[in-house]
Amino acid sequence: MKTLICKRPGEFGYEERAIPIPGPGELLLRMKMLGICGTDYHAFDGTQPFFEYPRILGHEISAEVAEAPEGSRFKVGDLVTVSPYFSCGKCIACRRGKTNCCTDINVFGVHSDGAMQEYISVPSSAVVPGNGLSAEELALIEPLAIAAHGVGLAQITKNDNVLILGAGPIGLGVISMAGTKGAKIIVSDVNENRLGFCKDKLGVAHLINPLKTDALAEIGKITGGDMATVIIDCTGNLEAINSAFRLLAHGGKFILIGLQKGIIEILHPEFHKRETMLMSSRNALPEDFDEVISSIKEGLIKPLELISHRVPFAGVKESFAGLSHTDQSLIKALVIFG
Ligand SMILES: [Zn+2]
Ligand SMILES: [Zn+2]
């Protein structure tokens, strides 16, 4: 089978390898489609911290079951996705059901070789049934599950004013998932293309470009002076995070999905007087995958709008660098396997 290996930053190479032989408790899958995300671009650029090379990238999986062992809950040809966060099952987080933040987490395609290959073998327990969704929809479940996890932590209701910082792929997922709760959605981004997408494709009414308007005054106006009862950061930008605390309502929640490397600065009295709840949101849980799949089935979210590029697997080596660096129209690229 054909594999694509990221040999070192900036360098991909195709290699022929044997089809993997599933170990105990594993399932052999044939790749159909693969979503490419920020982590993959950062790994290729050499800017992903603690990343080791050579590595096969890819963790946003749409596949079909290639071999179903006796007694399996799957049959050959079933369309599936994969929850790519393999947890230890023993640590303090796992014992308390928070497998998404396992102390010894192994993310497929990040900490171990991933899905830029024609066949993969993964723990059967990580395989999520496709439930009638299309192969394209299934390639979008993982980033949407990350969004759903952050939205779940915020316990959003229809009475919330939700400010979403950053309208990249995760931010767009958060907009969709928060929208299913009926909340008032406000989106802030410095990129006018992205704001336009939110308005045209997702029907977001309240858009802010903090480079052009005073966010504090604007959000005050939109919320009738209440401010944002929930802020979800999807930028991973230190300045965006630091300057957003003042936009939070008293009694509000601030959820960090985006990740950056610096130190967050909070003026204690401002934080304190709001009784601010600050949480990070890491990866996703199986129930987040289930929620996304049922939201798509019920027509509550329309994820195919997010796909801006489709690249055949054989063309990834050639087009990868151009996708992330030069293509302004990029939202979500899918790799299509033959
Ligand atoms: Zn991803
Ligand atoms: Zn664990």
Image (cartoon, rainbow, N blue to C red):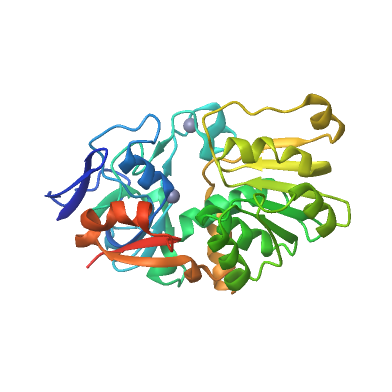
Up the image or down, 105 lies above or below 198; here it is above
Q: Is residue 302 left or right of residue 46?
A: right
The percent position of residue 100, horizontal first and vertical second, equals 52, 40
Q: Is residue 145 left or right of residue 325?
A: right
**Residue occupying the point 48% across, 66% down:** 306
Relative placement, left or right, of 324 versus 222 is: left
**Which residue is drawn at the image coordinates 57% and 56% (left, top)?**
167
Residue 267 image position (x, y, % from top left): 76, 27
Quarter of image, res 88: top left
Asked if residue 282 is positioned above or below residue 294 in the image, the reply reads above
Residue 196 seen from this side: yes
Q: Decide which of 209, 64 is in the foreground and name it.
A: 209
Q: Is residue 300 visible?
A: no
> Which residue is at 33% across, 41% downward?
45
Image location of residue 37, percent across then percent down? 41, 51
For the point 58% across and 43% down, which residue is it? 257
Q: Is residue 300 left or right of residue 69?
A: right
Q: Nearer the viewer, residue 118 or 264?
A: 264
Place residue 148 in its image quadrant: bottom right
Q: Does 269 sit above or below residue 106?
A: above
Looking at the rendered image, the quarter that the C terminus falls into is bottom left
Query: Residue 74 in the image: x percent, y percent?
Result: 36, 62
